[in-house]
Amino acid sequence: MNLEKYLVITDEIKEALANNTPIVALESTILSHGMPYPQNLEFAYKVEEIVRGEGAIPATTAIIGGQLKVGLTKDELELMCKAEDVGKVSRRDVATYVATGKAGATTVATTMMLAAMAGIKIFATGGIGGVHRGAETTMDISADLPELGQTPVAVVGAGAKSLLDIGLTLEYLETLGVPVIGVDTDDFPAFYCRESGFKVDFNAKDPAIIAKILKTKWDLGLGGGALIANPIPEEFALDYNEMEVVILRALEMAKEQGIRGKDTTPFLLKHIKDMTEGVSFASNLELAYNNARVASRISVELAKLS
Ligand code: PSU
Ligand code: MN
């Protein structure tokens, strides 16, 4: 392996790694392919601020100029948010983007990869990709799931959107041996909604317990990641049935327009946002802020244990 040649970590993050300062990784696909400019830039700054406010260092990841970036400069963040000619990079695309110098936004899967390469254990996002509805015929299963099975990073997310088949997503995670830990919830959250009707494996009441479970998992030599399922704050939660109508309509539109493969998730996200006139977008922002807060607290607790 010849990783040093490609992996570029900012000085601030290098120092944090050396000093056991808590760090939280953040993805860039949520910026480039999940939100419009310039709201995404405002969001990116605010998430980083929240992480710092909790005593951790933010590490947004991306692939730029043939390098795997852990921590972005102001200009790089702007580049990812403007998203002109910025691709969506999953595990399969990493070497192609690095070799060709093309700019790429990292998904949950690739942010986990870059975080692990740098030695970062905790990562905050909005929601994970999963098993799509109809996957029994399309085979559309996000690369986020096998990544959770193999890469030792804990992902803090508000569960999964019900545009996915949440039941099958949880079955798949079980098969891969991925713990699904609820943050003060018994129910696995469905992104905009606090409940999905499916259960988490364990309800953890506070970040210290979550940190202890993670430390124990990795001490035991059990590799792979964990999904920390953090429900959207009550005041921003949307009605499950109303969102279901919107999601079903978005799925129909995707089918009518023949949307497939890696375009599916960004297409659905955009149309859900448009159809709810931005109400769902406001909720999306708030749940992501909340995930950054909880991830920071877990990383602070984890730092105390090591
Ligand atoms: N789900 C969301 N918002 C997102 C994504 C998923 O609610 O922004 C993004 C994440 O980057 C995730 C990716 O890793 O989409 C999954 O894409 P796919 O389904 O093509 O694997
Ligand atoms: Mn897919």
Image: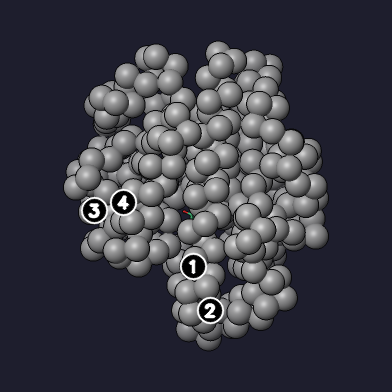
Residue 285 visible in the shown view: yes
Residue that mark 3 sits on: 78
Specify few, some or many for label 2: CA neighbours under 10 Å numbering under 14, 14-19, or 20 or more: few
Amino acid type of the residue tagged 1 in the rendering: Phe
Question: Residues under labels 2 and 4: Cα distance?
Answer: 28 Å
Q: Position of residue 304 (x, y in %)?
A: 56, 16
Specify few, some or many for label 3: CA neighbours under 10 Å numbering under 14, 14-19, or 20 or more: some
Q: Position of residue 105 (x, y in %)?
A: 35, 51
Q: Are marks 2 and 1 in contact (CB under 8 Å)?
A: yes
303 to 24, vertically: above or below: above
Question: Residues under labels 1 and 4: Cα distance?
Answer: 23 Å
Residue that mark 2 sits on: 276
Question: Residues under labels 3 and 4: Cα distance?
Answer: 13 Å
Q: Determine whether the beta carbon of the residue marked 3 sits less than 8 angstroms from the nearest atom of ligand 1.
A: no
Q: Quarter of the image for the N terminus: give it.
A: top left
Question: Residues under labels 3 and 2: Cα distance?
Answer: 27 Å
247 to 97, vertically: above or below: below
Q: Position of residue 305 (x, y in %)?
A: 59, 15
Question: Residues under labels 2 and 1: Cα distance?
Answer: 8 Å
Amino acid type of the residue tagged 4 in the rendering: Gly
Q: Are marks 3 and 2 in contact (CB under 8 Å)?
A: no
Q: Which badge, 3 or 1, comes first in the chain's sequence?
A: 3
Label for residue 104?
4
Task: Name the residue at 39% across, 26% down.
Answer: 118
Task: Name the residue at 31% across, 56% down.
Answer: 41
Front position among marks 3 and 1:
1
Observer-nearest of 10 and 145? 10
Task: Name the residue at 54% across, 63% down.
Answer: 283
Amino acid type of the residue tagged 2 in the rendering: Thr
